[in-house]
């Protein structure tokens, strides 16, 4: 693609269930020519380029402003494509593909030489997944090649879960945006490393640990994730990711105490002249009178909270709050992925409230 084309982004509205052939063909042609296409998946929007061309993939890093030491996920239209991309595929991988593909599970496998180093940030492994979205699958089939795609946000911003988020971040920086409205799951795929004797979850996501254990005998979690569960963690881990502009704190513990603590913190911040936004469950909606609230699902509806989370963080940014206070969620099922993103968004600024012995 000529570089001047980067200033012009074609935006197509595409039916998420029955993608029209014209925009899919146009987008596939751009991929084949080495350009960049933002497209919906069932998790979040991806920013794709031909995974087999180093030059094409460079365009992704440029558009996002992404550091090149972070490897990309390669998307495929069918499990069989793994055979050409990965080597020494273990039996577990086939069982997982059979059970969870297409779906929100990325498998990290030993890579074959045809995948350029820029895709995997020089690693000997590659993350591969088959997305479960008609538009993504139609694009992959029409392009007739694997597509490398990180989330379609500017580096550091929350991942995009609507076409509008992508347009906000990437208009003028990519060749085509396929806008199919809201994505389904709302959090990125689970990244599972299959290159060690016991599979390791590197990033929790749509396929939960509990689901993986239906297929695998044992699943480990990366040390970083375990640390999330032993909150509070070392304040040394300060990097922020998936992050809103305003500083954010996550409060964890018994829900009643959490709400009480957040209300106290919010009042204290207001005393200092700060505007506060509170990320709450449905149950907490009315617990913060006079404060701006962004409401996720109920405590037993993590799938709703997951679907809304990034949009709520972006919305709080638009309200230009000075501080975001978030209720922690249970680590069960999808909850562990939600907590992982909340903790990252907060730069691991986590407050644990203890059970009070004098509490009623
Ligand atoms: O749901 C998703 O996974 C979305 C959609 C677009 O598919 N993609 C996504 O990509 O979230 P990205 O680039 O934002 O996140 C990719 C994650 C990173 O945490 C990266 O470190 C990890 O996958 N990853 C990719 N290849 C890897 C590898 N070879 N070894 C270890 N981690 C890898
Ligand atoms: Mg990302």
Image: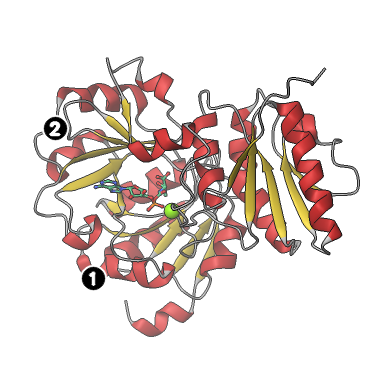
Q: First in sequence, mark 1 or 2: give its number.
A: 1
In which quadrant of the rendered image does the C terminus lie?
A: top right
Q: Is residue 191 above or below residue 140?
A: above
Q: Residue at x 84, y 57 (%)?
A: 270
Residue 89: numbered disc: 2
Q: Residue at x 34, y 37 (%)?
A: 223
**Residue 104 visible in the snapshot:** no
Point out residue 350 in the picture as x, y percentages from the top left corner: 58, 44
**Left or right: residue 340 compared with residue 191:** right
- Circle 1 residues within 10 Å: few <14, some 14–19, many ≥20: some
**Residue 93 visible in the snapshot:** yes
Residue 55: numbered disc: 1
> Depth check: 85 or 12 in front?
85
Q: Residue at x 77, y 47 (%)?
A: 265
- Circle 2 residues within 10 Å: few <14, some 14–19, many ≥20: some
Q: Residue at x 69, y 53 (%)?
A: 324
> Depth check: 186 or 140 in front?
186
Q: Quadrant of residue 211?
A: top left
Q: Is residue 198 above or below residue 249?
A: above
- Does any atom of ligand 1 lie closer than 8 Å to the CB of label 2? no
Q: Quadrant of residue 354?
A: top right
């Amino acid at each position: 693609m000529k570089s001047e084309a980067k200033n012009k982004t074609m935006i197509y509205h595409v039916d998420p269930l029955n993608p029209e052939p014209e925009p899919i063909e146009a987008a596939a042609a751009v991929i084949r020519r080495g350009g960049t296409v933002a497209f919906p998946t069932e998790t979040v929007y991806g920013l794709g380029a031909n995974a087999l061309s180093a030059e094409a993939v460079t365009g992704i890093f440029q558009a996002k402003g992404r550091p090149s030491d972070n490897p990309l996920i390669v998307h495929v239209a069918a499990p069989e494509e793994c055979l050409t991309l990965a080597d020494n595929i273990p039996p577990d991988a086939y069982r997982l593909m059979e059970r969870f593909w297409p779906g929100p599970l990325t498998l990290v496998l030993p890579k074959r030489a045809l995948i350029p180093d820029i895709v995997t940030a020089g690693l000997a492994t590659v993350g591969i997944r088959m997305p479960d979205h008609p538009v993504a699958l139609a694009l992959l089939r029409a392009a007739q090649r694997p597509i490398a795609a990180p989330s379609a946000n500017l580096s550091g911003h929350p991942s995009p879960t609507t076409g509008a988020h992508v347009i906000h971040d990437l208009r003028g920086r990519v060749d085509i945006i396929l806008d199919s409205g809201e994505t389904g799951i709302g959090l990125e795929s689970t990244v599972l490393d299959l290159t060690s004797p016991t599979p390791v979850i590197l990033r929790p996501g749509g396929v939960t640990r509990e689901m993986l254990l239906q297929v695998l005998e044992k699943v480990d979690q990366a040390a970083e994730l375990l640390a999330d569960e032993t909150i509070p963690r070392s304040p040394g881990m300060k990097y922020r990711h998936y992050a809103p502009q305003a500083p954010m704190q996550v409060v964890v513990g018994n829900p009643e105490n959490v709400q009480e603590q957040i209300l106290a913190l919010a009042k204290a911040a207001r005393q200092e002249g700060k505007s506060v936004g509170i990320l709450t469950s449905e149950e907490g909606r009315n617990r913060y009178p006079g404060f701006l609230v962004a409401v996720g699902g109920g405590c037993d509806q993590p799938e709703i909270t997951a679907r809304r989370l990034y949009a709520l963080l972006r919305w709080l940014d638009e309200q230009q709050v000075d501080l975001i206070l978030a209720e922690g969620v249970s680590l069960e099922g999808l909850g562990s992925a939600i907590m992982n993103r909340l903790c990252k968004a907060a730069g691991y600024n986590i407050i644990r409230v203890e059970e009070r012995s004098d509490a009623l």
